[in-house]
Amino acid sequence: MAGTWLETIGVEVEHRKIAAGLTHVPASPYHRLGIHVGPSVNAFCRCDGKRHRRVQSHGDIDIVPAGLDGDWEDDADCTILRLWVNPALVRQTARDLEIDPDRIVVEPQFQRRDPRIEHIAWALASGLHPELPSDRLYVQSLARALAVQLVHGASQRIPTGQMLSSSQKRRLQDFIEANLDQDLSLDDLAQVAAISVSHLKALFRRSFGVPAHLYVIHRRVERARLLLDQNEMPLSQIALEAGFAHQSHMARSMKRVLGITPAALLRLQR
């Protein structure tokens, strides 16, 4: 890796062949992007305390922020297009976009699909080829374009004390109640609140006192309890109406939240 590019342009890129088996990638002072090239492999990675098992396909992008190490294991030889990005470039790009760089947090991402990043990476791979003359202005433009994508894909630190607005809370409550029987996702809730998923996760907990998934479970348990009080449907149907995957799922959730199973509740009504 030619460190001069990281200092003068802010990026470096290389093709790297990875042998099958376990590879430890030590922490780096630079953000790292790895784009899988060629045939798919069965892959496992461990990074930032999280484990990911997946089929790694051509174009899948892993983003590892500066300061994090990790272990990657593939069941076959593979090739990645690896990029290093100087955090100083990302911070300066944030300033240019009139975003406070201290609020930008590049987080680990795995199997990100982003044609723009992929296109920029391949252009950089050509522009920074050691045997080809490089147009500095062209390469700098590509480097900044890559940094823009990282800034836009980064989460932002949320000021202490910031909460969801009353209208956001009401929209979320109404949406969840109307869709308890659906397979809700954080993306769904973030769209309702008109904020990013990372902001939704933090602000939901601050505003409701519990994470979004626990709030939904509690609302489903309450829906199930009301349906049980009516005693008009079999337990299997109540589970589906309340949004549980099946009757056993409902029973486990009610036991954790209420301390009593659906069957025991029904017996108490008799």
Image (cartoon, grey):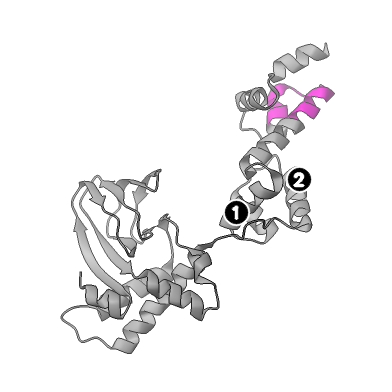
**Residue designated by label 2:** 178
The prevailing secondary structure element of the residues shown in magenta is: helix
In the figure, is residue 269 to the left or right of 207? right
Q: Nearer the viewer, mark 1 or mark 2?
A: 1
Q: Amino acid at mark 1?
A: Asp
Q: Write down the region rendered in magenta.
A: 224-239
Residue 187's label in the rendered image is 1
User: At x 29% / y 60%, what residue is drawn?
Assistant: 28
Q: Answer with the quarter of the image where residue 32 lies.
A: bottom left
Q: Tell me the CA gap for discs 1 and 2.
A: 16 Å
The residue lying furthest to the front in this view is: 160
User: At x 31% / y 67%, what residue is drawn?
Assistant: 84
Residue 66's label in the rendered image is none
**Is residue 183 at least partly visible in the picture?**
no
Q: Earlier in the sequence, mark 1 or mark 2?
A: 2
127 in relation to 74, above or below: below
178 in relation to 122, above or below: above
Q: Secondary structure at mark 1?
A: helix
Label 1 Cα neighbours within 10 Å, binned few <14 / some 14-19 / many ≥20? some
User: At x 71% / y 16%, what residue is drawn?
Assistant: 263
Where residue 115 sits in the image (x, y, percent)? Answer: 42, 68
Where residue 107 sits in the image (x, y, percent)? Answer: 45, 57
Task: Say whether residue 233 is magenta.
Answer: yes
